[in-house]
Image (cartoon, rainbow, N blue to C red):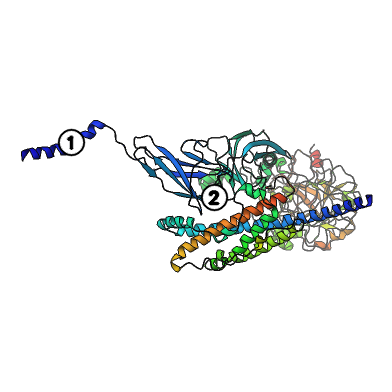
Amino acid sequence: MPAMDSVVVLLSVVCLGVSSQQITDSQRLFSIAVNRVTHLHLLAQRLFSDFESSLQTEEQRQLNKIFLQDFCNSDYIISPIDKHETQRSSVLKLLSISYRLVESWEFPSRSLSGGSSLRNQISPRLSELKTGILLLIRANQDEAENYPDSDALQHAPYGNYYQSLGGNESLRQTYELLACFKKDMHKVETYLTVAKCRLSPEANCTL
Amino acid sequence: MMTKVREVLLLLLLPAFVPHTDGTRYSLPGKPTEIKCRSPEKETFTCWWKPGSDGGLPTTYALYYRKEGSNVVHECPDYHTAGKNSCFFNKNDTVIWVSYNITVVATNALGKTYSDPVDIDVVYIVKPHPPEKLEVTVMKDQGWPFLRVSWEPPRKADTRSGWITLIYELRVKLEEEESEWENHIAGQQKMFNIFSLRSGGTYLIQVRCKPDHGFWSEWSSTSYVKVPEYLHREKSVWILILVFSAFILLILIWLIHMNSHSLKHCMLPPVPGPKIKGFDKQLLKSGKSDEVFSALVVSDFPPTTSNYEDLLVEYLEVYVPEQQELMVDEGKDHDGCLKSIGSASDSDSGRGSCDSDNLLMDKSGAAKEEQQQQNQEGDQIGTETQGPKEAWEKETMLCANEDVVSPSTSSKKVKTWPSVFSPVTPYSPSPLDPHNSLEMHKQNFLSDTQFPPGSPSSDHCIKKALQSSYWEVCFNNNQPYPQTDVHQQLQAHSDRNISAINDGNAPRNLLLPTRMTEYVEVQRVNEENKVLLHPIPSGHTREEACSWVGHGDNYSKVKGVNSDNVLLLQREVVEEESMEMAGAAESCYTSSIAINTPKPTTCSHIALPVQEERVLAVSGYVDTATMFSLDT
């Protein structure tokens, strides 16, 4: 029926307008989120390099060897590890993975605090980032199909993963902590950047 | 025993020989070192190693890697794509955020040698290719050129999807030997502008890039660009300013040069030198005082020559209307009226009367009396003692008579005989010596004083300090001047008897001495060869103020000329007295006139020696012209 068609057309136009507005808002939110995670990544890099430079050569080699055999606590979170996989993932999936990664560090980051002012900044910034990503998820969740992944919001037992190690391992523990933190921050930064570029109206989003 | 020793020796020596014959030595291969892995786009990566010594045997190299969290050892999939001693990991074999543990093994016939393991994470070993399609163009911004540099990211780097984020840097250099590179960070943009270019220069430009966490790429290929010639606006403005200021400077210099003389006068006023006749600076410098002073004694001073003309510096001629009469400013102490002498053609004597106060008629014939008179005059004047200058300044009063002046006369000049009436000389007023009464003053007196038309109204007296002339020029327009003669007569004082200097040849009106208030005129010469003088009738109403010779003593009679060629005038006492003449014992002045016929005179006048062409001022106004005509 022609009346129905016109109504559909009208509705689609309205939806388009609304979604474009949302897109604009989400672009802005993405920009903010990318900025924040980039800053966190830089913080993590700096902390790690400072720690590494304070180590002695012999210790460094030992730590390297040991580290390869250990895992980060976020290893259980399945995340794309190459470009192909990342391109294949949807925006929402990327956002949810990012959210989980950030959330997994919320508790252990408290053990990073103390000492320098840099360390003290990590925990609050992580909280802010988590909030931002949540907003983005909510903003992009409406038009997306139902997210089948139930494990996206699954909470792994972070708990005392890093606390379980003994005092002798403090050096190694710190090394692990900083290395994993750096890696995860880079992951989140990459995912968010890709998601943002995919949603960006311009062809070349790295302008 | 001996053979055993020999065998041992041989056994010992044998290995020594054996190697010599072999020549080469095989060993295990050296350890590969310096394993370096790089990923150009975060999707693939390549590892290179540096082989050690091969140990003399053909050596092969193998790379083994193990991923993080797995104990499975893999071997390098591709040894050839990236060249010798390299291993290339393609997309399928590359994962990021996973650590690789890489080991290189060198194998030869003798054995294997393992290198040190290296842990890498692809994310942190990204080194992209240099940017591509570097383009440089010259663009204009309001006449000023600038360079626009643009480029493209390396082909393989996926910046569009955001997988890799690159930041760029470019560097610029002038094509000169000693110029340096100038670096600019361009951020994530692919375009950059360069300003402040050198006109006509050639620039070299290169660009490189870097991922947000990684290594800088190599510099791209160089791009050359030549900037066109242009004139720097700032320079042109400065050139304009320079030219303008140089122009102004030239004008100023020229002006100063033109006015250098006046400027010099203004800033360095010339020091007045001594203007003393006979004063010789050089002599003074030489220090011979005697000579200096002797030089001062000028030959013609006191004036002995008959060249009186030279001493008459100027005339003071005043033309007055017929009704006007020159009057002495009465009631004032100062005055002296300077009798002006008209032009030579004017036979009229000067008229006017002078204050009897100031009049000192020397009735005695003694020079001393004259001196006394002078002194008296001086006293009477009072201020003269102060100094001639000041005296005159006080006494002189110049009353401009506008009516007198206004009539259009050819010359409104008031001329005087400065020397005659100069009361003051640079020298201190000393008692006058009869001879010196004929002083010739070479003072420069007020010369041609032009009275402006429309000068103040009657009774207006302009006090004028005539420093050099020390006169008192008095005009009083209240006094009608009976004479038709337009000459205005000035009467001046002098503290000395001024001897009328006259050029014997030139018919001139003699000037009466300063105190002369009586004006006589030679009427005629009677049969007795006497010069009859008659007073000049003056119709002024102030007759009483002045004493006329006619009213008083009448010197119109020439008594005679004495032996010294002195013309003696006879005074005929007239009853009429003039009150103002009180104290003015005016005597008749003898004038020694160079006349050929000496005439005896009986007069109590001072007989002054007559000298050639030397005429004394007489109390009467003697017209030599008339006198000379009597000679015949």
Picture quarter containing residue A99? bottom right
Chain name for mark 1: B
> Which is nearer the eye, B611 or B396?
B396
Question: Mark number for residue B124?
Answer: 2
The 10 Å Cα crowd at callout 1, few under 14, some 14 to 19, many 20 or more, is few
Question: Mark number for residue B14?
Answer: 1
Rounded to the nearest angstrom, the CA distance separating label 1 from label 2 is 58 Å
> Which is nearer the eye, B106 or B430?
B106
Q: Are marks 1 and 2 in contact (CB under 8 Å)?
A: no
Residue B97 is left or right of residue B461, and the answer is: left
Q: Is residue A2 above or below residue B329?
A: above
Q: Is residue B587 visible?
A: no
**Residue type marked 1:** Leu
Chain name for mark 2: B
Tell me the SS state at disc 1: helix
> Which is nearer the eye, B462 or B41?
B41
> Which is nearer the eye, A75 or A134?
A75
Could you confirm whether marks 1 and 2 are on the same chain?
A: yes
Q: Position of residue B155 (x, y in %)?
A: 63, 39
Residue A86 is left or right of residue A173, and the answer is: right
The C terminus of chain B lies in which quarter of the figure? top right
Q: Position of residue A46 (x, y in %)?
A: 54, 58
Q: Position of residue A2 (x, y in %)?
A: 94, 49
Picture quarter containing residue B44? top right
Question: Mark number for residue A117?
Answer: none
**Residue type marked 2:** Tyr
Numbered disc total: 2
Q: Is residue B442 visible?
A: yes
